[in-house]
């Protein structure tokens, strides 16, 4: 019996996903058909695999336009300090942050100010060049 759980995300671009994982200091691999390890040797495949420092990995694989997360969360949570909800929130927030900054650059906008609020939200003040 597999313990793997699949969770849909709003993540679409692999480069911003990878940058988010780097920003959060996760060790990971990128490629095709990488192995995501789970309970009793069960395995899934993914394009991005986060090494949790245990025998359980967290994978991201493309499903249509978005990535889904695939992991044996029971194993991850019982063998590492990583918690599903906070991991997904942190990666999603950092992904969005990197995406906004990239889109601002593409539209020739200047980041005037960045502020992290007490609840962890990030406010980015942008302005036009000129």
Image (cartoon, rainbow, N blue to C red):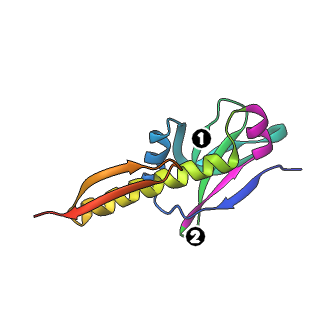
Q: Which residue is mark 2?
A: 64
Say whether residue 42 is visible. no
Q: CA distance from mark 1 to mark 2?
A: 21 Å
Residue 122 visible = yes
Where residue 30 sits: x, y (%)?
51, 45
Q: Is residue 31 left or right of residue 4?
A: left
Q: Is residue 97 magenta?
A: no
* Label 2 SS: loop
The quadrant the C terminus occupies is bottom left
Q: Nearer the viewer, residue 75 or 115?
A: 115
Residue at the limit of the structure toward the front, as seen here: 118
Q: Residues within 10 Å of mark 2 (few under 14, many from 20)?
A: few
Mark 1 crowdedness (10 Å alpha carbons): few <14, some 14-19, many ≥20: some
Residue 122 pos. (x, y %): 43, 53
Question: What residue is at 37 percent from the left and 60 percent from the top?
Answer: 100
Q: Nearer the viewer, residue 54 or 32?
A: 54
Residue that appears at 55% across and 48% down: 90
Q: Earlier in the sequence, mark 1 or mark 2?
A: 1
Q: Give the magenta part as a residue range.
A: 66-79
Q: Which residue does the numbered mark 1 point to in the structure image?
A: 50
* Nearer the observer, 123 or 42: 123
Is residue 67 positioned above or below 1 on the image?
Answer: below
**Residue drawn 69% across and 33% down?**
81
Q: Is residue 5 left or right of residue 92?
A: right
Residue 118 shown left or right of residue 57 in the figure: left
**Residue 77 at x, y percent in the picture:** 75, 39
Identify the residue at the far bottom of this view: 64
Residue 82 at x, y = what percent?
A: 67, 38
């Amino acid at each position: 019996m597999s313990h793997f759980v699949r969770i849909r995300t709003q993540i679409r671009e692999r480069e911003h996903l990878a940058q988010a994982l780097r920003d959060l200091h996760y060790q990971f691999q990128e490629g095709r058909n990488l192995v995501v390890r789970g309970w009793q040797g069960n395995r899934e495949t993914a394009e991005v695999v986060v090494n949790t420092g245990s025998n359980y990995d967290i994978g991201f694989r493309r499903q249509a336009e978005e990535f889904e997360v695939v992991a044996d969360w029971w194993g991850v949570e019982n063998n590492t300090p990583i918690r599903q909800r906070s991991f997904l929130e942190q990666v999603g927030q950092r992904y969005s942050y990197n995406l906004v900054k990239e889109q601002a650059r593409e539209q020739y906008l200047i980041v005037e100010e960045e502020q992290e609020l007490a609840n962890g939200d990030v406010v980015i003040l942008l302005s036009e060049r000129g």
